[in-house]
Image: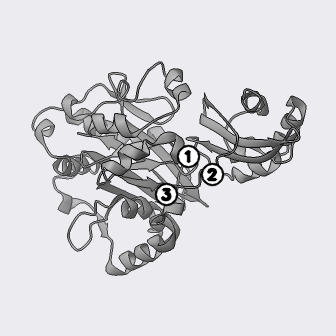
């Protein structure tokens, strides 16, 4: 494994829109052979999953009043708040998908490093979370292109819990499924669980100490490193322009169809926003924090025009490979959700 330095002109990049696009460039364009790791810090921002309805996840008046960026990632997962007290780590693996989907594999170096820094109770929990004393401080996600992929997540060091609780508005069903009543009752910062001097560090200082332990190095200079070049940054800038830096991508369209139903399953939250005409689905959009390498529009197309009955909806969903395009879920619970409107 080697480190990919994403600083620019010798300075860290904090722009969340820029940072969120890096994995896409590294997987699709640069394609450095082997296993690379990037780690960065974002300015205050809300990051939503590629399939999420931002209008159902974010308190927009608060977001705009406090000049918080809204950024849509290119992978699945849920909405998270970032600020200068939060780290993001991503493993970039090229031409070897042996560990795709194995969150524990990529969490282990982080967990081991935190154990070494005094947080002995840190452990992997559930599908893609890292927790301490039953409270989450890191969530992970992945996206794949061919046999290459990015796998990483957040690491809350000294994040503003008050801001996170105000700006995020998760589906109530998702909270209830986890037995909690609000966002901040189930998340924590890792800072207070660390030994000194780590507990008193800034997030930037903590990042350096974390990297040294992940790479078993005495200093950053001892770590094999690829530094993004001026040419790399020119391509990144061009990729951003007209897509990832647009409101159309980051905010997405709120279709405003008549019916909205949502439920949290083992694969994550799945929501249907749809309209009916003559007892048939006339329009439908699927949202959620599920993680898939498939194409959910195939499911939307299969449902469009289907009679709004259990048998017809089941038949429509059975024409699509749900496992490949959504996750490990059968047609029946999805049909039950649709009919619960």
Mark 1: secondary structure = loop
* Residue topped by disc 1: 52
Instruction: State the mark number for residue 250.
Output: 3
Query: Which type of secondary structure does the marked residue at label 2 adopt?
Result: loop
Could you tell which of marks 1 and 3 lies nearer the N-terminus? 1
Residue in view at x 37 percent, y 81 percent: 231
User: What is the crowding at mark 1: few (fewer than 14 residues within 10 Å), some, or many (at least 20)?
Assistant: many
Q: Which quarter of the image is occupied by the N terminus?
A: bottom left
Q: For this rendering, which residue is in front, 227 or 140?
A: 140
Q: For this view, does 163 lie left or right of residue 101?
A: left
Residue 267, given in percent of the width and then of the height, sits at: 61, 34
Q: Nearer the viewer, residue 66 or 35?
A: 66
Q: Determine which residue is flagged by label 2.
A: 293
Residue 154: horizontal and vertical position, in percent? 37, 44
Q: CA distance from mark 1 to mark 3?
A: 10 Å
* Residue 212 point in image, percent of width and height: 22, 50
Check if mark 1's residue and mark 3's residue have beta carbons within 8 Å. Answer: no
- Numbered disc in front, either 3 or 2: 3
210 relative to 169 in the view: left or right: left
């Amino acid at each position: 494994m080697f480190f990919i330095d994403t600083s620019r002109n010798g300075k860290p990049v904090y722009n969340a829109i820029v940072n969120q696009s890096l994995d896409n460039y590294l997987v699709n364009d640069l394609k450095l052979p082997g296993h690379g790791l990037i780690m960065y810090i974002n300015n205050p921002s809300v990051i939503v999953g590629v399939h999420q309805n931002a209008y159902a996840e974010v308190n927009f008046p608060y977001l705009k009043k406090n000049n918080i960026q809204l950024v849509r990632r290119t992978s699945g997962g849920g909405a998270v708040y970032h600020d200068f007290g939060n780290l993001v780590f991503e493993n970039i693996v090229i031409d070897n998908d042996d560990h795709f989907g194995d969150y524990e594999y990529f969490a282990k170096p982080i967990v081991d490093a935190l154990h070494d820094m005094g947080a002995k109770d840190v452990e992997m929990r559930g599908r893609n979370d890292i927790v301490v004393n039953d409270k989450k401080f890191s969530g992970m996600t992945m996206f794949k292109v061919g046999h290459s992929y990015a796998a990483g997540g957040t690491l809350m060091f000294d994040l503003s819990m008050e801001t996170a609780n105000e700006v995020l508005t998760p589906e109530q069903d998702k909270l209830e499924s986890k037995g909690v009543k609000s966002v901040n009752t189930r998340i924590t910062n890792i800072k207070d669980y660390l030994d000194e001097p780590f507990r008193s560090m800034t997030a930037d200082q903590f990042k350096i100490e974390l990297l040294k332990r992940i790479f078993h190095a005495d200093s950053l200079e001892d770590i094999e490193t690829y530094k993004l070049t001026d040419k790399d940054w020119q391509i990144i800038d061009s990729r951003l322009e007209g897509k990832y830096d647009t409101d159309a991508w980051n905010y997405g369209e709120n279709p405003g169809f008549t019916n909205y139903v949502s439920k949290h399953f083992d694969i994550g939250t799945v929501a249907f926003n749809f309209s009916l005409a003559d007892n048939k689905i006339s329009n439908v959009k699927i949202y959620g924090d599920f993680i898939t390498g498939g194409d959910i529009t195939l499911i939307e197309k299969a449902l469009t025009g289907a009679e709004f009955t259990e048998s017809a909806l089941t038949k429509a969903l059975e024409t699509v490979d749900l496992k490949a395009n959504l996750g490990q879920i059968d047609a029946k619970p999805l049909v039950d959700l649709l009919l619960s409107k």
